[in-house]
Image (tube, rainbow, N blue to C red):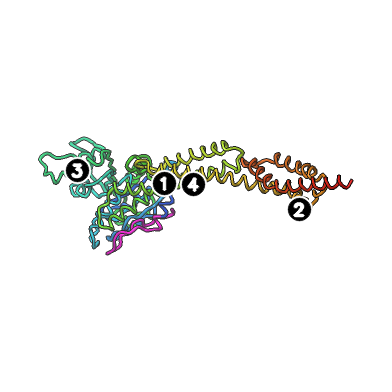
């Protein structure tokens, strides 16, 4: 993708909606996806970091006014810079807390969708980690905290600390603190056991921030650029491909179907449920896995097998190889196949394919043999039709003339396993003519002797 596209639209007085063009882009991605989403208050520089993750200075809109510039969830799919055969999917979200929104409930849904769709979630905040920021983060499966315009010294009790230690200290439960104040901390510690924090200096003077995407790196704070580089390297190296229940790796196709499932739940007035989404996704993906397996079977069969085969064993051996490839494809893509329902469905389809293949093999062989017999015995049939053998000794002449096409038929290659049956059927069909010739031969020979 050359530029980002809106994946989930959030328009005023309208329910959330999937952008079909963006969805199709996702559905076409068969590779595993590393999904990095960023959330946080509007006007906190989220889009700048996402552009950098894409290796670009421009892409996601930064904006320069007090109005939020990103609405809904925007997506940018790029080849992963370090993980081969992976796609990096960047999700830039609508800023939280925009006072101009008529429906603040959308903040919750945008946030929830970011959590549900991402494999790595970046929470972008300004200043410091305080109680207000913590209370906005109560339901995380995972996250990285990016603190912007950080101006404090990283010290605790007079000792220098790391950014991760700074985060852990902020999440430490305080003695005698009201339970309500510690709820967010407990949730973060529970739902995200592996936590990471990055702090960033202000990139440049305030008056230059509105033109941040156009500034050369030489005009940005060297400390800020160093911190950005560390952040990018960590995300590119450590962010894993998204997986769902059962450890199944998510492709772009799966991610697109997940997005549809979650948005449909929200539009229907229900809370998106991971278990229900995975169940629906399993049905979609397992059906697709069956179809992909059958396609692989057919493709492999076309390359491996040329009909007709000379023996049944040759056909069964080829089918077995194709079947193994098909099952391998199915097992690689399917998941959550309870009671092996879809695997059994695939097995039934493969058995049906074998029956069809055997029938087709016999039909192709029979058609080829019949065509060959018609060609080889054409002269003989014409002689019969013209009465050439209606003479004394005609039957022996008929047998002699029949011997040559019979020998040619036996030597002809590629007839398949119906060769003997086709010949028997032809000779049986020709038997009436042969008997007629024999009878005429006897009558004419008798009359010839009587004439003598």
Residue 250 on the magenta segment: no
Q: Residue 232's image quarter?
A: top left
In-front residue for pair 172/341: 341
Residue 340 appears in the figure: yes
The residue positioned farthest toward the front in the image shown: 450
Q: Secondary structure at mark 1?
A: strand
Characterize the local packing of mark 3: few (<14), some (14-19) or many (20 or more) Cα atoms within 10 angstroms. Answer: many
Q: Spatial distance from mark 2 to mark 3, Cα to Cα?
A: 101 Å
Residue 13 on the magenta segment: yes
- Mark nearest the camera among 2 and 1 is 2
The location of residue 26, given as percent across then percent down, is 40, 52
Q: Spatial distance from mark 2 to mark 4, Cα to Cα?
A: 50 Å
Characterize the local packing of mark 4: few (<14), some (14-19) or many (20 or more) Cα atoms within 10 angstroms. Answer: some
Which residue is identified by label 1?
87
Mark with earlier residue (2, 1): 1
In-front residue for pair 366/401: 401
Mark with earlier residue (1, 3): 1
The location of residue 233, given as percent across then percent down, is 37, 41
Q: How many marks?
A: 4
């Amino acid at each position: 993708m050359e530029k980002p596209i809106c994946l989930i639209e959030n328009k005023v007085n309208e329910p959330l909606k999937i952008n079909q063009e963006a969805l199709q882009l996702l559905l076409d991605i068969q590779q595993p996806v590393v999904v990095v989403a960023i959330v946080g208050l509007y006007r906190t520089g989220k889009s700048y970091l996402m552009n950098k993750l894409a290796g670009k200075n421009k892409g996601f809109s930064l904006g320069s006014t007090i109005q939020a510039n990103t609405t809904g969830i925007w997506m940018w799919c790029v080849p992963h810079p370090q993980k081969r055969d992976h796609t990096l999917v960047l999700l830039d979200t609508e800023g939280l807390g925009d006072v101009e929104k008529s429906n603040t409930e959308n903040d919750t849904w945008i946030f929830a969708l970011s959590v549900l769709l991402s494999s790595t979630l970046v929470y972008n905040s300004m200043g410091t980690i305080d109680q207000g920021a913590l209370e906005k983060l109560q339901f995380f499966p995972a996250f990285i905290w990016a603190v912007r315009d950080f101006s404090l010294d990283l010290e605790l009790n007079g000792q220098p600390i790391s950014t991760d230690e700074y985060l852990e200290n902020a999440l430490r439960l305080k003695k005698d603190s009201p339970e309500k104040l510690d709820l967010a901390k407990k949730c973060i510690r529970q739902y995200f056991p592996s936590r990471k924090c990055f702090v960033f200096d202000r990139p440049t003077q305030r008056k230059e921030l509105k033109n941040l995407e156009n500034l050369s790196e030489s005009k940005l704070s060297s400390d800020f650029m160093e911190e950005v580089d560390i952040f990018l390297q960590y995300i590119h190296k450590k962010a894993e491909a998204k997986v769902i229940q059962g450890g199944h790796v998510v492709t772009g196709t799966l991610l697109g179907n997940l997005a549809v499932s979650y948005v449909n739940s929200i539009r229907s007035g229900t809370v998106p449920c991971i278990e229900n989404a995975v169940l629906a996704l399993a049905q979609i993906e397992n059906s697709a896995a069956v179809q992909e397996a059958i396609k692989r079977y057919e493709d492999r069969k076309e390359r491996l097998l040329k009909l007709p085969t000379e023996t049944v064993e040759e056909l069964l051996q080829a089918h077995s190889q194709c079947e193994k490839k098909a099952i391998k494809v199915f097992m690689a893509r399917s998941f959550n196949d309870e009671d092996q329902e879809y695997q059994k469905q695939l097995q039934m389809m493969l058995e049906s394919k074998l029956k069809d293949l055997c029938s087709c093999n016999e039909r192709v062989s029979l058609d080829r043999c019949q065509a060959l017999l018609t060609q080889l015995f054409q002269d003989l049939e014409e002689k019969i039709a013209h009465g050439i053998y209606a003479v004394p000794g005609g039957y022996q002449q008929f047998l002699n003339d029949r011997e040559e096409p019979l020998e040619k038929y036996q030597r002809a290659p590629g007839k398949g396993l119906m060769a003997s049956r086709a010949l028997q059927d032809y000779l049986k069909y020709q038997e009436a003519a042969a008997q007629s010739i024999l009878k005429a031969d006897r009558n004419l020979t008798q009359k010839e002797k009587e004439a003598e």
